[in-house]
Image (spheres, rainbow, N blue to C red):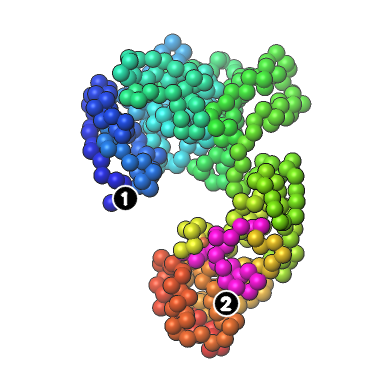
């Protein structure tokens, strides 16, 4: 079993849910769509003693009222996406929330309660000036987004309280809107998001909670729209946020002090120099950047794969000064002054290396995920001489292949050794 054991209670009303949560104490958790909660349970990041299931608690009302859309906490994201004709901004943003399969089950209230700083629905709610209605031991209260979201995954929800509804003001007639998101893949966590609704501008992911940029709104209000004004607003917005950075982008590289290797603080950038696949490379990196991320994201050498990130699967194997090593267990700064070879170095143009050809002949790969790492380790083994069967098996014990089976891989390495 992946999650820890827990008691389970199906609530048939809000009252039942609140009573169960109160009785369950601090370790009781409500479960709505479960699209974020279940992964956290699977990884045992959460260890509730009781799960209170809200799926039958009657929180799925959806109605327009006095220019507001009232959305029950258990309304599915996919349902809102289909029904939000009067809220084109929300509908547009929902297309970025996970995938069709997660939106089918994920709920609007669940996303708001989860309070991920990079989530789309909290940002839209903040930009539109909506509200969150919660119920709990001290009765119902309505909270504005700026008083609800505290930081990543943290809200002002009190113990025993539940979100029961959110309200979404309709845009004013003729009001312009836009939702833009930058993410590496569709459905992936946002690297940055911006919502514009009239003259309200709000950003997410570059901040730890949905943030309305009042100064930008003030700049836009009362001025004639122009490209120049938009650029000015963008430049102002950039000065108002301090993005936390990401494995794919450091926000500080251009401003931080640079130094050559030796001693560097976490605030400094280290200039490194190495040879990769025969090419000289000069780069500036934070000390915490992993070698595998450096290869993939800085140099675009995506043949080196990332699997476990803790040295077990072998898919990130490269050669560092002729030795096969795990690039997920090395820092890029440690490779300063070294010579690196990745799987991209093996073929000469269209001509595969003898080992690669042997892999092809022996059907030694299927999905190919493990293959670059095995090729790099086996290439080094072959460079040392003709390996024994035991040496090949020993080498492969450090590489996980989920789909091919090891016999054809052993055969390919033996055949390449015999050539
Ligand atoms: Fe490096 Fe698995 S990703 S060993
Ligand atoms: Fe698929 Fe090895 S070929 S994991």
Q: Which residues are magenta?
A: 313-333
Whether 401 is drawn above or below 19: the answer is: below
- CA–CA distance between discs 2 and 1? 38 Å
Image location of residue 45, percent across then percent down: 39, 43
Residue 16, percent across and down? 23, 24
Tell whether 81 sits left or right of 3. Answer: right
Tag of residue 2: 1
Residue furthest bottom in the image? 418
Q: Residue at x 44, y 17 (%)?
A: 143
- What SS does tag 1 mark? loop
User: Residue 383 location, x and y as percent?
Assistant: 60, 81
Q: Is residue 329 magenta?
A: yes
Up the image or down, 351 lies above or below 66; here it is below
**Left or right: residue 110 compared with residue 184:** left
- The spot of residue 386 in percent (x, y) is 54, 87
Q: Quadrant of residue 330?
A: bottom right
> Residue drawn 45% across and 77% down?
394
Give the quadrant of the C terminus.
bottom right
Left or right: 2 in relation to 306: left
Relative placement, left or right, of 217 versus 410 is: right
Within-10-Å neighbours for mark 1: few <14, some 14–19, many 20+: few
Q: Secondary structure at mark 2?
A: helix
Is residue 356 visible in the rendered structure shown here?
Answer: yes
- Corner quadrant of residue 55: top left
Q: Quadrant of residue 51?
A: top left
The residue most toward the front is 263
Query: To which residue does mark 2 refer?
Result: 379
Q: What residue is drawn where x is 69% and y is 50%?
A: 264
Q: Viewer-nearest of labels 2 and 1?
A: 1
Of the pair 225 and 129, the residue shown nearer to us: 129
Q: Could you tell me which residue is drawn at 58 percent across and 32 percent down? A: 207
Q: Which mark is residue 319?
A: none
């Amino acid at each position: 079993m992946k999650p820890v054991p827990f008691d389970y209670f199906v609530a048939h009303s809000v009252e039942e849910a609140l009573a169960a949560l109160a009785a369950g104490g601090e370790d009781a958790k409500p479960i709505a769509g479960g699209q974020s909660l279940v992964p956290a349970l699977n990884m045992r990041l959460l260890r509730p003693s009781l799960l209170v299931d809200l799926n039958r608690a009657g929180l799925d009302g959806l109605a327009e009222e006095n220019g507001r859309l009232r959305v029950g906490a258990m309304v599915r994201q996919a349902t809102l996406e289909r029904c939000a004709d009067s809220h084109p901004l929300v509908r547009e943003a929902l297309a970025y929330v996970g995938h069709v399969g997660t939106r089918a089950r994920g709920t609007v209230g669940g996303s708001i309660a989860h309070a991920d700083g990079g989530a789309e629905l909290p940002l839209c709610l903040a930009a539109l000036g909506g509200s969150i209605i919660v119920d709990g031991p001290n009765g119902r209260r309505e909270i504005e987004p700026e008083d609800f979201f505290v930081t990543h995954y943290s809200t002002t929800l009190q113990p025993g309280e539940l979100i029961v509804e959110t309200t979404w003001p309709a845009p004013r007639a003729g009001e312009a809107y836009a939702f833009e998101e930058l993410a590496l893949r569709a459905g992936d966590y946002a690297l940055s998001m911006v919502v514009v609704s009239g003259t309200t501008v709000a950003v997410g992911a570059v901040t730890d909670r949905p943030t309305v940029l009042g100064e930008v709104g003030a700049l836009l209000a009362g001025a004639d729209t122009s490209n120049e004004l938009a650029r000015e607003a963008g430049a102002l917005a950039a000065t108002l946020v301090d993005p936390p950075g990401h494995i794919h982008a450091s926000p500080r590289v251009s401003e931080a002090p640079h130094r050559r290797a030796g001693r560097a603080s976490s605030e400094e950038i280290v200039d490194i120099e190495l040879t990769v696949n025969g090419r000289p490379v000069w780069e500036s990196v934070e000390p915490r950047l992993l070698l595998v991320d450096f290869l993939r994201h800085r140099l675009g050498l995506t043949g080196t794969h990332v699997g476990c990130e803790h040295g077990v699967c072998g898919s990130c194997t490269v050669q560092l000064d002729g030795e096969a090593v795990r690039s997920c267990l090395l820092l890029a700064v440690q490779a300063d002054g070294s010579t690196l070879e990745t799987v991209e170095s093996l073929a000469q143009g269209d001509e595969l290396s003898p080992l690669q050809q042997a892999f092809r002949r022996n059907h030694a790969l299927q999905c190919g995920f493990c293959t670059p790492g095995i090729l790099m380790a086996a290439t080094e083994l072959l460079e040392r001489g003709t390996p024994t069967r035991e040496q090949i098996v020993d080498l492969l014990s450090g590489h996980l292949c989920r789909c091919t089976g090891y016999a054809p891989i052993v055969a390919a390495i033996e055949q390449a050794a015999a050539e």
